[in-house]
Structure formats: C-alpha cells, structure tokens
Image (tube, rainbow, N blue to C red):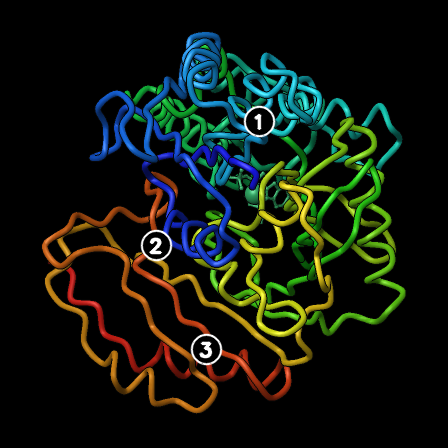
Amino acid sequence: MARVMLLIPSASYRAPDFMEAAARLGVEVVVGTDRRSPLEGGSHGGLATFDFVDLERGANEIEAYATLHPVDTIVAVDDGGTLLAARAARRLELPHNPVSAVEATRNKSLLRAKMQAAGLPSPAWLVALVSEAPEAVAVSVRERVGYPVVLKPLALSASRGVIRADDEAEFVRAFRRVVSILSTEEALAECGAEHADRVLIEGYIPGIEVSLEGLLAQGHLRTLAIFDKPDPLVGPFFEETIYVTPSRLPVEQQRLIEETAERACFALGLRDGPVHVEIRLDGRQAYVVDVAARSIGGLCARTLQFGTGMSLEELLLRHATGLDVPSFERDSQAAGVMMLPIPRAGTLRAVEGVAEAESVPLIESVTVSIPIGGRVVPLPEGTEYLGFVFARGGSPAEVEAALRAAHEALVFVIE
Ligand SMILES: Nc1ncnc2c1ncn2[C@@H]1O[C@H](COP(=O)(O)OP(=O)(O)O)[C@@H](O)[C@H]1O
Ligand SMILES: [Mg+2]
C-alpha cells in the first residue's frame, strides 16, 4: 500500500478530512506540518515537523525523514505547502509539478507575467517596492495602469492585503495599509522575506467571478466543479462568502472558463494534481485572477461529493497514489458553502442562532471555527473566517437562498 506524505500547514482547516479519507482508503499517511503547529516536536508516529519557510532546509528535512521512512508521494494540502511539496518531491525523485510552475502560483507578479506572455487576457500591472513613496507610486500607477486598481502582496492568500483603490488618494492610503500588513512577522513568515518587500498593483478587472476546481493529469485539466460566487466582489476588500455549484452560467461561458483555466495551467507548466483557479468574466473576456496548485481551501471541499459519496480528499488521494478513481462526476445535487466573514475586530464572546440556522431547509451544517474567547480580525488584515455554513439540494438558487437565510439567523457577539 502506498505511503503518502501530506504537507499540512498548522493554519489549515483540512487535516481531519484528509485523514478520514486516508483511513477509508487504507492509505498510510505521514503528516508533515510546520514549526508553528501545536503538534510540533520532531517526528513521531504519523507526524513530522519541517521548515515550511526556509524551503531548502525544509526539503533537506523531508529528504532525511524519507530516507528512514520512505514515502511514495507528497501532497500539499494548502498554499503554505505547495512549494515545499514540489521541492521535496524533486529531491526525492517522486512525481511532481515543476518547481518553477509552482513558484509562479505563489508569486502574483510572476503569475501576471506568465499569463501575459502566454497571451491570456491580462490587466496592466506594475510592481512597487514597499520602500517607495506612495505618492510617487500613485502617479506611476495613473500613468502605467490607470485607476481603478487592486493592490496585493505577492505571496499572501485568502484575500489578505488585497485592496481596491479608485484614485490616487485611495491608493496612497491602501499602499500604506498593505505595507503595514507586510511588515508583520506573521506575513513575513507566510510570504518569505524575498516577497515581502514589494506590492503588485494591477488594473481592476470588472465582471463576475467564479472558481474552477480541477485535477491535472499529464497536463490535461479535468474540471471537477465550477463555483459561482454570487455576492458582488467589487472591493475595497475581497471577502469570500458564498460559493455555489453547479454554475448557473451559460454553457459557452463555462467552456470559456475551462479553456482559460487549462491555458493558464499550461502557461505555468503545471501538469499534475489539484488546481484551484479564480477567473473573472468581463463580457466575452475571461481573466485569470489567481491559480493555486492545491484544492479548494477552508472547509469548502465539503460541498463536493463524487460518484457515490466520495469526498474530494479521497479522490485526490486516489489520484496521488495511482488508485483507480471510480468517478469524477460530481453528484447531481446543487451544493454551496458560505464562508462567514468577520464583521469587525474584537473578541468573539458568543455565537447565537446555530440551531435555528441549521433548521433552515437545505442547510446541512453550521461550523463555527473560531473558539469563544478568540480574537477575530476582519479583512484586509485578518486570515480567518468565523466559520462555514453548508447547504445541499434543490437548485443553485435555492442553495444560495438557504445559505443567506442561515446567515441571517446567526448572531456573532463580538466585543
Ligand atoms: N485585478 C483584479 N480585479 C478585480 N478583482 C481582483 C483583482 N485581483 C484580485 N481581485 C479580487 O481579490 C480576490 C483575492 O485576490 P487574489 O489575487 O486571488 O489573492 P489571494 O491569493 O489572496 O486569493 C480575488 O478573488 C478577486 O475577487
Ligand atoms: Mg485567490
């Protein structure tokens, strides 16, 4: 039986779902996690800690570990692990995506450059150093990009530090805010020092946004699901809320999304494993916003079931270990998730209305993921959600309405 190394950053929500899938399949798993994990402390049993920040060192540690306890494949579970997985797999001569391809998914300016070079629709963009005077950058942005724009750190995720600016005055304020986010130790650890000294500024892409969940095999992209994001994502901050699948877009637009996602993967050189691609549709143009060499984040994968009740995690583990995948077809029901946004900063004192929210028709479950007494920080500085609401059945519109009704029933007491 194959032995899988799962690289799971301590901030990930997904360890239990992957472990459950592995247990169901009888696949032996070792979890590699980072030093910030509460489970830290060398390697014991099915757990080992590696350096997720210094990737050279992390790859050395994985190599040393695998010499004693061989693994057949390395799977990255969230953004924090994709680069380490590619580098360690290269070292161990295991199948993997080219390191340079994964690097471009973890560096937003590199992603932009590759999309543009491949002739994919791209906004104008430039990169500024955090040390530059914001007023001067604001002028270059007017001349070279044109307002409105979106500012983003090169290597954070979950919309952290992503801010829209409509004119020079807004730009100056937004720039200072991104710079201050990048100066935190936490951002430095996530981003790496080599990415924390600059900011990407790109033209604002209007239109609607979708995400495509896909699986690459030998460079061919198979769509597992397209999610509509029915809440307007117009800024100034880009909080993810509702995802619903199947998409309600016309078939031709869904084709365009799939084609664009496949071209993006090809342009990057990604060949194998899960991808999560975010695309904006503006009229007939599809713009790639973001490509990640991992599956959908948070607990959102719980919306997906394939064949007769196979989870996304099981499907991915089957793919990674060369086991037969009995079905790539999503079950026929509509499904959706709402990531519960943090309305303001403070301490979470209570969550009310959970039973009421769970009793809304089509609602499967409500998961609150921040402990009572925990600190909550909204975007653009924050990294977490209050929790997740899941719905299934009926039409996509009914799923969306159920998620909204459940959200209405929830009261978060934040002091
Ligand atoms: N150029 C853009 N135009 C419009 N919206 C954007 C643009 N870039 C990012 N966004 C919005 O911000 C969100 C987060 O940006 P993204 O590049 O995906 O960063 P992250 O890695 O944090 O997910 C996107 O999902 C999208 O809604
Ligand atoms: Mg994104």
Left or right: 188 in relation to 3? left
Mark 1 Cβ and ligand 1 under 8 Å apart:
no
CA–CA distance in space, label 3 to label 2: 15 Å
CA–CA distance in space, label 2 to label 1: 22 Å
Q: Is mark 3 on a helix, strand or loop?
A: helix
Is 369 in front, or is 221?
A: 221
Question: Which badge, 2 or 1, comes first in the chain's sequence?
Answer: 1
Left or right: 42 in relation to 231? left
Q: Where is residue 42 in the image (x, y as percent from the top left)?
A: 26, 20
Q: What element carries label 2?
A: loop
Q: Reply above or below: 296 against 121.
A: below
- Residue type at numbered disc 2: Tyr
CA–CA distance in space, label 1 to label 3: 31 Å
Would you name the residue on which mark 3 appears? Answer: 403
Mark 2 is surrounded, within 10 Å at the Cα level, by few (under 14), some (14 to 19) or many (20 or more) other residues, namely many
On residue 385, the disc is 2
- Residue type at numbered disc 3: Leu
Q: Quadrant of residue 381?
A: top left
Q: In which quadrant will I find the N terminus?
A: top right
On residue 106, the disc is 1
Number of marks drawn: 3
Question: Which badge, 3 or 2, comes first in the chain's sequence?
Answer: 2
Q: Is mark 1 on a helix, strand or loop?
A: loop
